[in-house]
Amino acid sequence: LTQERYVAAGHVVMRPQDSRGDTFQDWFVKQRLGLERRVAATSYGFATVAALLVGTPHVATMHERLARQMARLHPLTIKPCPLEIPPMAQGMQWHQYRTQDPGITWLCEKMRAAARRLGAG
């Protein structure tokens, strides 16, 4: 999948309901790369994007882990994205005086454990 074919293809994209303006992907492709994608269809959820691809020549850009899960359910082909998209990072923040809060400590450990499980799969 070349960059030219990727950009020229119809794209199925996830847009949160009632969203205003560009998604991160829209912004990134337009502002950082100077490219314009043609949106063929939209969905309110990431999991339904894959179903909208079936039987079409369209493409979608999604997290690799989700793409692999969806390819087990739908007849899809996974290709590397021809654009350099930086990895996403998740973060949490709270007021410095709450660092010892038992609830925050518990939540942080749950998030770390979930991240470890994702990294193993």
Image (spheres, rainbow, N blue to C red):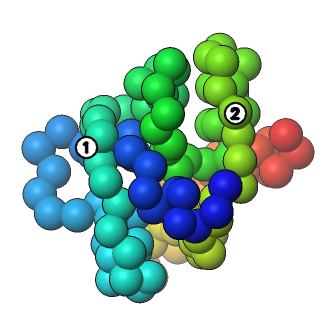
What SS does tag 1 mark?
A: loop
Q: Amino acid at mark 2?
A: Thr
Q: Which mark is residue 68?
A: none
Residue projecting furthest to the top: 73
The picture places residue 45, in percent across and down from the top left corner, at: 37, 33
Residue at horizontal 44%, vertical 82%? 33
Q: Is residue 69 in view from this perspective?
A: yes
Near mark 2 (Cα within 10 A), the count class, few <14, some 14-19 or many ≥20, is few
Say whether marks 2 and 1 touch (CB < 8 Å).
no
Q: Amino acid at mark 1?
A: Pro
Residue at horizontal 11%, vertical 44%? 18
Q: Nearer the viewer, residue 59 or 70?
A: 59
Q: Is residue 102 in view from this perspective?
A: no
Q: Nearer the viewer, residue 23 or 101?
A: 23
Q: Quadrant of the N terminus?
A: bottom right
Considering only vertical position in the picture, is 94 above or below 118?
Answer: below
Relative to residue 91, is residue 115 drawn left or right?
Answer: right
Relative to residue 96, is residue 62 drawn left or right?
Answer: right
Considering only vertical position in the picture, is 110 above or below 47?
Answer: below
Which picture quadrant has residue 26? bottom left
Q: Nearer the viewer, residue 100 or 114?
A: 114
What SS does tag 2 mark?
A: loop
Discs 2/1, front:
2
Considering only vertical position in the picture, is 5 above or below 95?
Answer: above
The picture places residue 13, in percent across and down from the top left corner, at: 36, 44
Q: CA distance from mark 2 to mark 1?
A: 25 Å
Disc 1: which residue: 16
Q: Which mark is residue 77?
A: 2
